[in-house]
Image (spheres, rainbow, N blue to C red):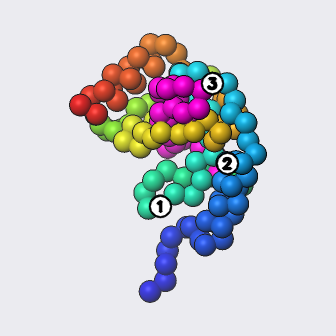
Amino acid sequence: MKNKSRKSGEDFNHWNQQKQKTHFDKQRPFFHEQEVWFCALGVNIGFEQDGRGNGFLRPVLILKKFNNEIFWALPMTKNLKQGTYYAAISFRKNTQSTLILSQIRLVDAKRLVYKAGAVKQQDFESIKERVRQILA
């Protein structure tokens, strides 16, 4: 039976090379909670959210900054989704995105590539409350 996965061994090899470069060579940028950054999430397994394109990037919302090195990230998608584990947000004018609340993850700041914007304070508070409800 043919494997219908969109991922190939070449994808994993390319990501592994990039991941090593990020680990050894990259400096951590300065970041804050509430910001949206494009983040090198890489090639992940199964239903985990991947990065896209050459840099394996995906936008993430910085939910909780623990220190200058690590934070909790919520991956985003352009696909508008509804349900318990999704939250619609806008961080750019006339652009709607969806946070994937169920895929919260701890991320090292070395994975941050560039800042794309920030969510409004009121929206951020609402998102934090939604995450609390899921984790409780």
Amino acid type indicated by mark 2:
His
The picture places residue 134, in percent across and down from the top left corner, at 28, 34
Q: Which residue is mark 2?
A: 23
| Point 41% across, 43% down: residue | 103
The picture places residue 136, in percent across and down from the top left corner, at 23, 31
Q: Give the CA separation, mark 2 to mark 1.
A: 20 Å
The kind of secondary structure element at disc 2 is helix
Circles 2, 3 touching at the beta carbon (< 8 Å): no
The disc at residue 45 is 1
Circles 1, 3 touching at the beta carbon (< 8 Å): no
Magenta residues, start to end = 56-79
Q: Give the CA separation, mark 1 to mark 3.
A: 27 Å
The picture places residue 39, in percent across and down from the top left corner, at 62, 41
Q: Give the CA separation, mark 2 to mark 3.
A: 18 Å
The disc at residue 31 is 3
Mark 2 or mark 1, whichever is nearer to me = 2
| Point 52% across, 16% down: residue | 120
Question: Mark 3 or mark 2, which is nearer the start of the sequence?
Answer: 2
